[in-house]
Image: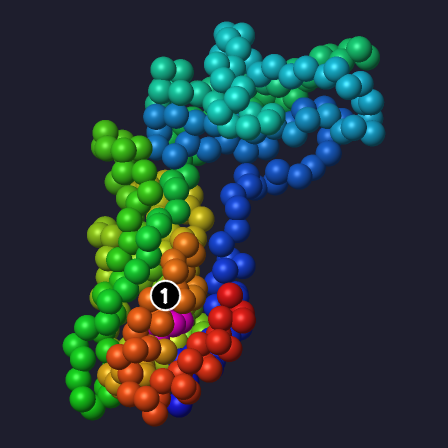
Amino acid sequence: QNTCVQTSLISIEMVRVINLSFYPPGAVAVTNRPHIYYCRSPNMEVFTCWWHPLDNNSESDDNVTYSLTYSLERECPDYVTGGPNSCHFDSGHTSIWTIYCMNVMARTSHGVFSSKDHCLDVADIVETEAPVNLTYTLLNETEEEAGRTAMVSWVYPNPSLIQYGWITLVFELQYRRIAEPNNWKVKGLLREPCLELLDLPVGEYIVRVRCRSRNNGLWSKWSIPVLLCVPVKSTPVGTLNCLMIQLLSTPNLNATSLITTHLKRLPNNTRTRTTVTYRRVHEYT
């Protein structure tokens, strides 16, 4: 009994760990001169580049200043938006089909240190945001405990960034059983932010989705995964088990209050057993 909950004690914690903060790739390194290591555009209308500063061991000067220049010695328009050691180009400074050649200068009391030139076309560095609000609904409920169809949906976090038509999004959805970590099933390339997973057998699944521009090969990061539970059958206890798994793996929800409300609808002979199971799961969240 309570199969979905009992096999999810570790998986809920795993889903929470996957929700990591964003850091640009290669953000930790030391160099003896500046180095532009990563540039990204979310929509072909703006872009940001990051560089590695000087190695503190090679230059102990505390008064190092950095400047980025690009085409015809123009200076970076915004050193703030992208965070430390970055340059952000807003829509007024971004042109598609234009080659940007950039260079970072580090000025110290010991001299000036220059990076290698870094050249790019904005169209080649498009990397979209990860989809958000990944949810599902179980369909085609039957009495025979057969496989269920799950309607999975999600949204793009900043639709305004792609409203001018430069980018057409495509999505890729992956899902697997919790007990099969290397057996991802792939659905793509999807044009709509939803998909029906047909005839899923009883069990628990992890579902995630990512996206990219149709004309660019750089995928976004994965969405925060969702735990999808297909209960043994449609009973109050089976439904509550799946409800607990979904709520406890979802940030910013008052799972305790919602589950307590649902418990009041259960028969007395199942309420105690389900409450104990809930407490065991709650310890892992």
User: Does residue 218 appear to the left or right of 61 in the view shown?
Assistant: left
Seen at 80% across and 18% down, the residue is 61
Q: Residue 278: image x %, image y %?
A: 44, 76
Residue lying at 78% horizontally and 28% vertically, measured from the top left = 56
Question: In the rendered view, does 7 fall on the left or right side of 192?
Answer: right
Taking the spot 20% from the left edge, 90% from the top edge, the residue there is 144
Query: Of the residues shown, which amino acid type is indicated by label 1?
Result: Ser
Determine the image quadrant of residue 84.
top right
Q: Position of residue 44 (x, y in %)?
A: 35, 29
Query: What secondary structure is the magenta-colored segment mainly?
Result: helix
The kind of secondary structure element at disc 1 is helix
Query: Does residue 208 belong to the magenta stretch?
Result: no
Q: 83 and 53: which one is in front?
A: 83
Magenta highlight range? 242-246
In this view, the residue in front, 142 or 278, is: 278
Q: Is residue 119 visible?
A: no
Determine which residue is flagged by label 1: 257
